[in-house]
Amino acid sequence: MNNQDISKMMVIFDLDGTLWDSAASVAESWNMEIERVTGNDPHFTAEQIQRNMGKTMNEIADDLMSFFTPDERYDIARKCEVFENSYIAEHGGVLFPGVEETLERLTAAGVPMSVVSNCQEGYVPAFMKSMDMYRFFRDYEEWGRSGMLKAANIRLVMERNGIDTAVYVGDIQKDADASAEAGVPCIWAAYGFGHIAEPAAVIHSFDELPAALTQLGFPGLED
């Protein structure tokens, strides 16, 4: 990436386990909606939600609602998605330490940034609204909006914004696999929910990101 125009280079972020932890709010919203629909509170925990972060919503439904038939669980999951978005927009989640300050620094340096997640349609805007994050991100894409998985969405965001090179920042192996498929290096957010084998770089806290980007060839981020 040496000697490239930083305006043609993008940092693309995973959301859950990388920028924030919304597991408690997601669990609360799903419990409320499933009780409304079925009359029974499943008592999902934040830990159960964290275990499934990074999967598509159908995959999460398969894991958490296997006691329903596939048609039933996917129908309930669609209802949970809608309620979850409104709940998250109002109640938010917890940003990881250093996220806002580091995004401010990258924005000031002219680094284009986007979010790509395997979430339902509307979840990324709910995150941005609840945490006042719109000002940092040029674009975003979701599994529920595009109907495509993460690798294709990474490429879509790059093409849509005229980006030549990018890095993806994520916390689980599925993020690294998607990055490899998309042809971009992956930075492992080791403070998140999972493990990545052989990442291009590792950050143990979010404020280490500028140094990792410098290591990978992003100019103008040296202290």
Image (tube, grey):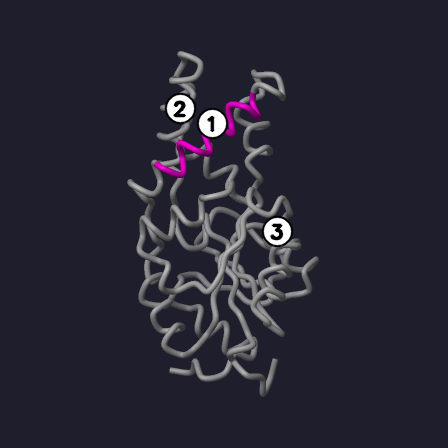
Observer-nearest of 189 and 64: 64
Q: Is residue 3 magenta?
A: no
Residue visible at 59% across and 64% down in the picture: 160
Observer-nearest of 35 and 138: 138
**Which mark, residue 150?**
3
Observer-nearest of 198 and 4: 4
Across and down, in percent, residue 52 comes to 52, 37
- Tag 3: residue type? Lys
Vertical arrangement, residue 32 with respect to residue 26, above or below: above
Across and down, in percent, residue 38 comes to 44, 14
Across and down, in percent, residue 28 comes to 35, 30
**The C terminus, quarter of image:** bottom left
Going from the N terminus, do you reach mark 1 or mark 3 first?
A: 1
Q: Label 2, on which residue?
A: 33
Cα distance in 3D space between marks 1 and 3:
23 Å
Observer-nearest of 203 and 105: 105
Q: Please tell me whether mark 1 or mark 2 is closer to you in this view.
A: 1
Going from the N terminus, do you reach mark 3 or mark 2 first?
A: 2
Numbered range of the magenta stretch: 73-86
Residue visible at 41% across and 49% down in the picture: 125
Classed neighbour count for the residue bearing mark 3: other residues with Cα under 10 Å, few (<14), some (14–19), many (≥20): many
